[in-house]
Image (cartoon, coloured by chain):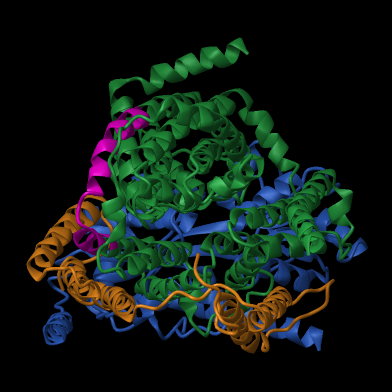
Amino acid sequence: MMRIAAAILSAGMALSATAVSAQEWPSKTIKLVVPYAPGGYTDSVARITARYLEKELGQTVIVDNRAGGGGIVGSDLVAKSPGDGYTLCICSVGAISVAPVAQTTSYDPVKSFKPVSVVSTIPQTVIVNPSLPINTMQDLVAYAKANPGKLSYGSSGAGGLMHYSVQLFDARNGTKMTHVPFKGGSPATAAVVSGEVNLSFTNMTDALPQMEASKVRALAVTSAKRNEFAPQLPTVSETVTPGYSVESWNGVMAPASTPDPIIAKLSDVLKKMAADPEVKKSMAVVGASTVFTTPDEYKAQIAAEVEQWRELLKEIAEKKN
Amino acid sequence: MTSPARRGNNTDFYSGLLLVAVATVALLYIRTLSVGTVLEMGPGYFPLGLALVLMVMGLCLAVKGLLAEGSPIGSFHLRPLICILLSFTAFGVLVERAGLIIAILAQVAIAHFASVETRWRQSLVIGVLLAAASAVIFVWLLKIPVDLLP
Amino acid sequence: MTDVFALLGHGFAVAATPINLFFCLVGAICGTLIGVLPGLGPVATISLLLPATYALSPVSAIIMLAGIYYGAQYGGSTTAILVNIPGESTSVVTAIDGYKMAQQGRASEALAIAAIGSFIAGCIGTVVIALLGPPLALMTQQFASPDYFSLMVLGLVSAVVLANGSAFHAIAMIFLGLLLGMVGMDLNTGEARMTFGLVELSDGINFVALVMGLFGVAEVISNLEGASVRIVNQMRIGTIWPSFKALRGAWGAVLRGTALGTLFGILPGGGATIASFSAYALEKRVAKDRSRFGNGAIEGVAGPESANNAAAQTSFVPLLTMGIPTSATMALMVGALTLHGIAPGPMIISRQPDLFWGLIASMFLGNAMLVIINLPMIGIWVRLLAVPYRLLYLAIVVICAIGVYSVNNSSFDVYMTVGFSLLGYVLRKLDAEPAPLLMGFVLGPMVEENFRRSLITSHGDPMIFLQRPISLALLLVSVALLISIMMPAVRQRRVEVFQE
């Protein structure tokens, strides 16, 4: 029995080791790994992307949810997968730009992957419970300065983007707010609605419906530019903290060993996808803007973000000592 | 009624030992975590408290088992235990490397030896049927992302 | 009030179109199937089948996906009763008395009461959504972290009731479960705890792997010990319909389970699993003769099965009225809606009346379909028990392995099952019961999370648990329950002392 199993095993390995020709790619089912649980907005973005890739490449693209460790488990899996173009990742800012700085990960955000293109971006929205006397970002900074430690903010858990974006805000403005972690962005937003916490830097996806129903008061968006879905909202950068820019993105990445022709072919498809009106419409429902970047731009963006968070953590650590 | 077991050789004593062992392993890992105070709890606060309570409860049970008579522990049967556990391990090892069908056949082959009543012809038929049914239900109908063959 | 009926009538008009009826049926059948298959749960299935709904209208899609979810609650009890393997986490406690009933030749009675109880609970739960959805949703907003903490404490105290043996052993098992629940990343600091350096453990131990190991696989191993396999020989098929007497005994349990399930379903976090555990504990508390529990008490099946289905219906309330998902399944429903171009939120009822009322009406129809599908199935299921165990166990281990694997598509979870099967087997030999351990495991992380969050928001003042009325009331109930558990033991000891 064991001998048979061993024979089968080695045969399987020999098969997967055969060289893949980029011209023929894709000749079989592509696995698009989502390092988050089904139902979140990364999952939605992944499914929109999978649907488009399937249509353009003429091959089945299955979405494979590998949740765990705030995206680390799934991203790690892709980093270690064979670079044959049949395992791709819809990665996100949390596991790529933040986690490797804040924690130890077995992958390197720049060296372990070949980035293909960012497919969507989504800003965070500064929302406060409407019972607070805070109507503008200036009010927020003034209130936080007058009452240090009194304002509490909800996050999706320690070390996540919702946590660090406020830490960055605090560091730049000299304010101090109390961190209240939740299990995910959605309960954190719900806590702002119910008043259990005072504010949150929440994803546009979660914030939009509550803003429309006036359950929360939105003050600003965290991206460098105003957002198409809520153009009335100013940016944090133009109000109180010049240069402040935090944006959540999702992008397609491949294992580092993937041949360049495959990356190039994929990049072309994603470029077409970014111009597709159907895709734009679907992304808009999630609250995401459709984006295209070249592999090089994407790589540079990741490197810059890693630097930003590394410096922030150094700053915080120095303040503590 | 089962006859009362001798002191030190009953379920209480061994349950106690098990709890103490689990608590000890946990404490070894909790050592590295900061505990903090009631007002500013560290990540180790809750686990430390739980492990200590478990340790005390385990010690109480072990001492009770030593001092008083209790019910005897059930006898272990290694053949079904080892075969079934191995069969799951084989499935886990093979499913991503050799595909679902081979993983199922391997699991059935190993699990076959767990019982003295199995007959290899029947097990073979069951194995093939299971592999075919799983291919239809899980992969074709429910579309779980797994390869059928290597 | 008349408004509601007019709107509900509109809902029925939407739900009863042939296409929506068809997808409601597809969802119900699919849900029953995955409920029966251990491991593979609604979350995995809905996410796998989501692409298949792209071509449908949003209403048809959500009707089908909801059908999968509550259909799974029907199917989940089947393997729990027949072979002691809970098909879903919500059916763990059903296995305790349901499997005993099967061993006594009352499998069809247990299966029938599970289906009938689920149907009644499903209908009542749906009425509650229709009539009281929005006000109930507002009520849940009154719940803050301290209240959740106190609710979890009540849950832990009632877990002691779950056990049939001594309270001391049960408490030890709860603490073991709590400790296992601590494995994973600390929410407040992001630090890994007791993960042995494995990233796969950073989100904690997989619940399905734990349940499957402690219950299902351990059961298979100990069934294989005997020379001749016992359960099959003792099994008689019996009649499908439960006797009038049995039904009368279960009537109260169905209603109590429904009430608990309706309530827990609305609250975030707990949901259907805690509802079923609490329903079992409640039945055991109110029963005149507690020794029947663990020995085939029909209330032990009727209560939890009604509770989990009621909770499955009402867990839609926060999603549909506020756009806030309260569980992984509901988060997936949000994903499904957005992919169909609808952003769920507080405005969904007024903007998408077809969707809201159509879904509610479809729940009535779906529950009716499910009870019609499931009752005749009982005859087939029970016949499965006539299959020789030497063949059956091979099928069981394979289905368990695929089931565990499919939750996260992870071989690691299969290895975890191996570890927990060993633990389950050892616990069996030591006469220790795994149900309280599971309750501790489920509640542990929530207890810690809410306790620490309460103290952060109160700036370190522990009085917050006594100042909030909801929290105070829940704590008082917990203390009363604890005293009532301890009292008989104390009284008995005094009697013994006097006799000596």
Q: Position of residue B26 (x, y in %)?
A: 61, 83
- Residue found 25% across the figure and 72% down from its top: B95
Chain A, chosen colour in render: blue
Residue in the foreground of this view, choosing between C442 and C108: C108
In the figure, the shade used to draw chain C is green
Residue A143, horizontal then vertical, whole percent: 88, 57
Residue A185 rendering spot, x and y as whole percentages: 60, 57
- For this orientation, the residue located farthest to the front is C500
Colour used to depict chain B in the structure image: orange
Q: Residue furthest right?
A: A146
- Is residue A225 visible in the rendered image? The answer is no
Residue A192 against residue A215 in the figure, above or below: below
Question: Magenta residues, as a range?
Answer: C369-396
Q: Residue furthest left?
A: B121
Q: Quadrant of the N terminus of chain C?
A: top right
Residue visible at 43% across and 34% down in the picture? C113
